[in-house]
Image (cartoon, helix red, strand yellow):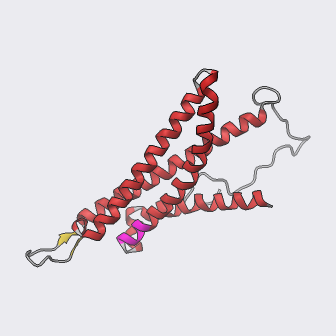
Amino acid sequence: MRKKLGIKGSPTAVLQYGDNGGAIGYLVGEENKGLEIMFGMMNHARFSVGLQGLAISERAYQKAVLYAETRVQGIPIAAEKGTPINQHPDVLRLLSIMRSEIDAMRALIFTGANAMDIADNCAKEVFENEQKRASVLIPIIKGWITELSVLHCSVVCKFTEAWGLLKKQALHNISVTQESYLSMRAQLLFRQMI
């Protein structure tokens, strides 16, 4: 594995099994239930990616708030000293939009998790309805939240202005990590179209 920025745990090497006599396969789950198990696993993976997008957005927002509280710029007419930029209207607008979008992301995550939990632990009559609800929410959780988290990282990068400062505050790493997740998603979609 080589050193890289962003996703540290993704493989950049190939492991080949079965050099001496072939690989051995094992049945996972019940016979003829593999596709169902695979889709269940993929839904949990999609949900986890959405949750990770929420975490990245929240962290970027926290960094932006901290920066806005400490960055002094501009002197109001009636004051002797400059004010922190978190008191500037446009900065307040950016932070308010980010906060409200992050709250909406969190609400969507909770709603999706609730639907998945009910579907996993309910009577047969309720299962189908909650399963349908989860199947609608999970792609939205993954797609909308991850794309919005890239936007949040981009806004925070522009907000803090200096790329060198970003590296110091680790926002550079957050942004690159989230963009690499989006890139992997684009590569997966491309492979599916082929």
Q: Is residue 128 above or below residue 107?
A: above
Q: Residue at x 36, y 55 (%)?
A: 99
Q: Residue at x 40, y 66 (%)?
A: 156
The residue that appears at 57% across and 34% down in the rendered structure is 116
Instruction: Please state the horizontal and vertical placement of residue 97, each as a whole percent of the image.
Output: 37, 60
Q: Quadrant of residue 158?
A: bottom left
Please indicate whether residue 86 sits to the left or right of residue 76 in the image. right
Q: Main secondary structure of the magenta part?
A: helix
Question: Residue at 60% of width from left, 20% of height from top?
Answer: 123
Seen from the viewer's position, the closer of residues 112 and 158 is: 112
Q: Position of residue 13 (x, y in %)?
A: 71, 56
Magenta residues (range): 155-160
Q: Quadrant of the C terminus?
A: bottom right
Quadrant location, the N terminus: bottom right
Q: How many marks?
A: 0
Viewer-nearest residue: 96 or 56: 96
For residue 170, say whether it is visible: yes
Image-quadrant location for residue 189: bottom right
**51 in relation to 90, above or below:** above
Residue 191, percent from left and from top: 76, 59
Is 105 included in the stretch rendered in magenta?
Answer: no
- In screen coordinates, is 146 left or right of 72? right
